[in-house]
Each structure stands twice: as C-alpha cells, then as structure tokens.
Image (cartoon, grey):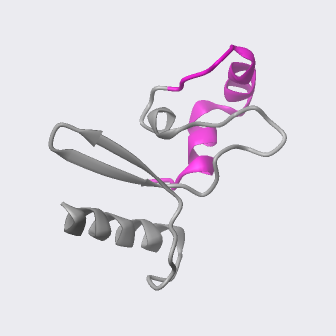
Amino acid sequence: MINVYEGLISKAKEALGLPQSSVGCPHGLFLWKDWMVVIPRRKSGIEGTKASAATGGIVGSVWLVDESPMEDWLRLGCRNVLAQLGVEP
C-alpha cells in the first residue's frame, strides 16, 4: 500500500512542478474501499475570499460551516475555484 501512495505522491509532485527530491508535497488524500486518490493542491483557499475546500470539496462535496463562503464560490464559479485550488485536468 505504501508503494502505491508513494507512486501517487510522485505523480502529484510532477503535476505541481515540484522536484522529486522535495520532502513535502501539498495534497489531499481520499480513501474509499480499495481506492486511494491523491489530489495535488496548489493552495487551500483563494486569497481575499472565503472560497476554500478540503479534500471532500475537491471531489465535489463542499462542506461549509455557514453559507457565507457560498457567495464567493458562486461569484467565482465552482470550476474556477477548484482549478485554483488543485490542478486542472
């Protein structure tokens, strides 16, 4: 299992343009049954807004404590927010 994780981290570093020798790699990890998904992260939120997302948000389930961040999500566009937080396909 660790070999799979390390391979996914290697691909995340590549997607982010990080050298393979770098110690850290910002990412989210999503586990489901026998699936492991590593999501490269460029940032955790968009500066000057309340638009942010944890790993669940990146895979389509945005969890909010209150509704105020939704205004920024809708104003900026969901696809645009996710593209800024992660890596566009």
Identify whether 66 is placed above or below 84: above
Q: Is residue 64 shown in magenta?
A: yes
What secondary structure predominates along the stretch shown in magenta? helix
The C terminus sits in image quarter: bottom left
Residue lying at 54% horizontally and 55% vertically, measured from the top left: 41
Magenta range:
62-89
Residue 53: where, in percent of width, then height?
58, 36
Residue 85 at x, y percent in the picture: 60, 48
Along the line of sight, the residue nearer the viewer: 11 or 75: 11
Quadrant housing the N terminus: bottom left
- Relative horizontal placement of residue 53, taking residue 21 as reference (left or right): right
Residue sitting farthest toward the left: 34
Query: In x, y percent, where is residue 88?
Result: 50, 53
Residue 42 position (above or below residue 61): below
Residue 80, image x, y percentages: 62, 41
Q: Is residue 3 above or below residue 68?
A: below
Which picture quadrant has residue 45?
Answer: top right
Name the residue at 44% across, 82% down.
20
For the image, the number of numbered tags is: 0
Q: Would residue 16 be counted in the magenta stretch?
A: no
Which residue lies at the image location 31% right of the left edge and 49% below the top edge?
Answer: 37
Quadrant of the rendered structure where residue 4 is? bottom left
Horizontally, is 82 left or right of 60 in the view? right
